[in-house]
Image: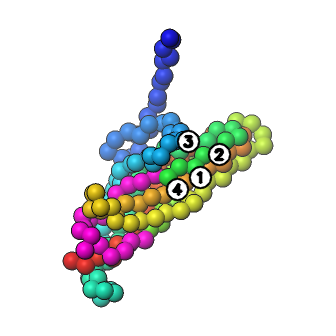
Amino acid sequence: MTARNQTQSWINDIDSPVAVPHASINLQGRDAMPVTNAIGEQVLEAVVAGPDGANRLFTVTGAANVCIQATRQQRSTETWTFLVGPTLTRLQFHRAIGTASVASQTVSVQTTPREFTVNVHSVEADWDDEDQRVEVRAEIGIISNGTTVEITQLRYWVAILAQL
């Protein structure tokens, strides 16, 4: 058996309290989704007259550090999860919706032709019974042709309807 030395570089993001590994995560054939933490979160709470007794609307914005990479003629799609907003019981939580966009990306041109595509395929926000917070799931896709593309941060906006 031979041992290989593996080096890993890290990205220090100005909004992040911790460094993020600068490597892609290959989850092909695995059931787990990569998990990250929300950072720089801001919460705005408003009193509303909503359906079925809902009386609070939380608007939550922030960022989530991720690491998704595609090189040369590669495609990569990953679903990242993170928790946002206040702690709520199942009876307090009514509904949540969310959106996300790519906030930080690096592109390195290698050969011709040179093109790449970055997509936010879907964003879902729903109450997580284990953590009693809203879990956001963002599916991100990258297609690379003659480039190395790396996504390192998402920005999100989530609205949570609750009854307090």
Q: Amino acid at mark 1?
A: Gly
Mark 3 highlights which residue? 28
| Mark 2–mark 4 CB contact (< 8 Å) | no
Circle 1 packing at 10 Å, graded few (<14), some (14-19), many (20+), is many
| Residue most extreme to the top | 1
Q: Magenta residues, as a range? A: 80-97
Q: Which mark is residue 150?
A: none
Q: How many marks?
A: 4
Residue 34 rendering spot, x and y as whole percentages: 44, 46
Q: Residue at x 53, y 44 (%)?
A: 68
Q: CA distance from mark 2 to mark 4?
A: 13 Å
Q: CA distance from mark 4 to mark 3?
A: 14 Å
Mark 4 highlights which residue? 139
In terms of sequence position, does the residue under pointer 2 or pointer 1 come before the other? 2
Residue 141 rendering spot, x and y as whole percentages: 59, 52
In terms of sequence position, does the residue under pointer 4 or pointer 3 come before the other? 3
Q: Secondary structure at mark 4?
A: strand
Q: Residue at x 43, y 62 (%)?
A: 156
Q: Which mark is residue 75?
A: 2
Mark 1 highlights which residue? 141
